[in-house]
Amino acid sequence: MRGSGGRPLGSGRPVRRSGALASGSGPAAGRSGKRSAGDRLSVLGAGGGAGGAGGRGGTGARRASVLIRPLVRVLVPPADPRTGGPVGQRVALTLRAGDRRPGTDAVARGIRPDPPLPSGTGVWQAAAMTARAADRTCYDRATAHLDAPLAVVDLEAFDANADDLVSRAAGKPVRVASKSVRCRALLERVLARPGFAGVMSFTLAESLWLARSGFDDVLLAYPSADRAAFAELAGDPKLAGAVTVMVDDPHQLELIDASRAGGREEIRVCLELDTSLRLLGGRVRIGALRSPLRSPAQLAELARSVARRPGFRLVGLMAYEGHVAGVGDAVAGRPLRSRAVRLMQAAARGELAARRGEVVRAVRAVAPELEFVNGGGTGSVQHTAAEAAVTEIAAGSGLYVPRLFDHYTSFTGRPAALFAQPVVRRPGVGVVTVLGGGYPASGAAGRDRLPVPYLPEGLRYDRQEGPGEVQTPLLGSPADDLLIGDKVWFRHAKAGELCERFDALHLIEGDRITATVPTYRGEGLTFL
């Protein structure tokens, strides 16, 4: 385990699983939360009630004949006479307007207290709902005592996604990217699972903090110019033994040496390879502008520079193929673009696999005791793992599965990290306004960088306003069933950036919170 020792904070009780998730491993374990119509339950039971339609004025007559939004998700016991459903099968209940909930005296419309489990023998009907709506009921019940804005992580989905990453890595260890998690407790949780080893950090200051917190294998994924942090690293044997820094230029070695301030500890070094695809004689470049090192000769020359320089030891190579791992190849409604992306990625994988193998051989000729060759990302785990030259895989976004990771043919994850904003206004029919919500992701500006309204299903942004800094109007028929104070659940476009907006994550199992853990921000840390 790469943790601080003991049981990981936030591990909670064993996650309730059923069906394919029961094994906790294998490809099915991390597959989508989407369910086919055959997986949904139709529940017929007893009890009935009639009563007034209720309503909130204005559109009450139209609402009186429709099903109100679901408020309950339950676990049906074995041989339940109402459903015959198996243990652990989620059953969602929807009552007609005016129906009375079993065991209560309250009319269904507008009720917000947590209802009891269904009981009694009267005749009443419950309609099946989608898995997403059932999740919403769980999240609402789990956080009923908390005011939004707030953020949650569904531990069942988080663990299933972790299983999927391990399954796709096919026996090679997965190094978890901390920038996609930004929560120490969840880093500890995932590193306690078989198949994960080590952290990939994003700043040197973060790397040192993680090492002091008990993480003993930290690879800094980006070069640094933090002189004060390099002085700490060079002066502390524990930190120097746990942290590996990234280098792609000999001038970076000079900066480190100039920052030592008397520290003589040996600095562990990793070299980064440029993975971009070059076409038309180099006139077209596809891929991130990262390392200037592209050829085996260039990497071998820098490896020799490290070997000649006292106080440094070359221990690893890294190559992140962001144009394969981080670009979806199955975008809904864009079949031609998706096909073009798949063709590009197939070409990029073939070219990189051959070149990466040559680079590794060239560097090992200089540094035969190379400890690791890191590659990949959430969207390319199985492809990168298939390369003989690669010894470990990097991934992080695949744990939370933000919206930008919905469009891949290689895997289908389960959304695990969400945030909720409260309804504060009802401007008109089919419209509600929530507090805040304007949390765009980094990268080239575009609609795909915006968070997406997720629960209840069917809400959308107003095109003229979009998500706002202090308020966000949402349109759609589900708005008519939302009351002031209700929560609307969103998914962020990226993974860890959500944690820069919230001090804590509420960890949910089933329909209850089992732990509340601080994010980096909640620990008073903002590394970028």
Image (tube, helix red, strand yellow):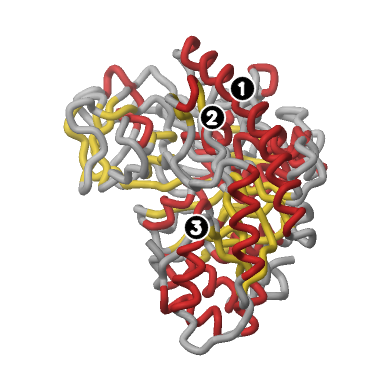
Q: Which residue bears the numbered disc 3?
A: 249
> In the figure, is residue 201 to the left or right of 37?
left
Q: Secondary structure at mark 1?
A: helix
Image spot of residue 201 (x, y percent):
54, 60
Bin the neighbour count of mark 3 within 10 Å (Cα to Cα): few under 14, some 14-19, many 20 and up: some
Residue contact between numbered discs 3 and 2, judged by CB atoms under 8 Å: no
- Judged left or right of residue 341, residue 74 is right
Residue pictured at 81% horizontal, 34% vertical? 79
Closer-to-camera residue (70/220):
220
User: Is residue 186 something one can see in this rendering?
Assistant: yes
Q: Say which quadrant the N terminus sits in.
A: bottom right
| Tag shown at residue 277 | 2
For the residues marked 3 and 2, what is the alpha-carbon distance in whole angstroms?
21 Å
Q: Is residue 193 above or below residue 284?
A: below
Residue at mark 2 to residue at mark 1: CA–CA distance:
8 Å
Q: Residue at x 75, y 41 (%)?
A: 169
Check contact, mark 2 vs mark 1: CB within 8 A. Answer: yes
Disc 1/disc 3 C-alpha distance (Å):
28 Å
- Residue type, mark 3 in image: Asp
- Tell how many labels: 3
Q: Earlier in the sequence, mark 1 or mark 3?
A: 3
Q: Which residue is mark 1?
A: 347
Which mark is in front, 3 or 2? 3
User: What's the residue type where badge 2 is placed?
Assistant: Leu
Farthest bottom residue?
A: 262
Label pair 1/3, CB-CB below 8 angstroms: no
Is 492 drawn above or below residue 354 in the view shown? below
* Residue at the top extreme, as displayed: 336
Q: Amino acid at mark 1?
A: Ala
Instruction: Look at discs 1 and 3 and give the one toward the viewer.
Output: 3
Q: Position of residue 428 (x, y in %)?
A: 18, 28
Which numbered circle lies on residue 158?
A: none
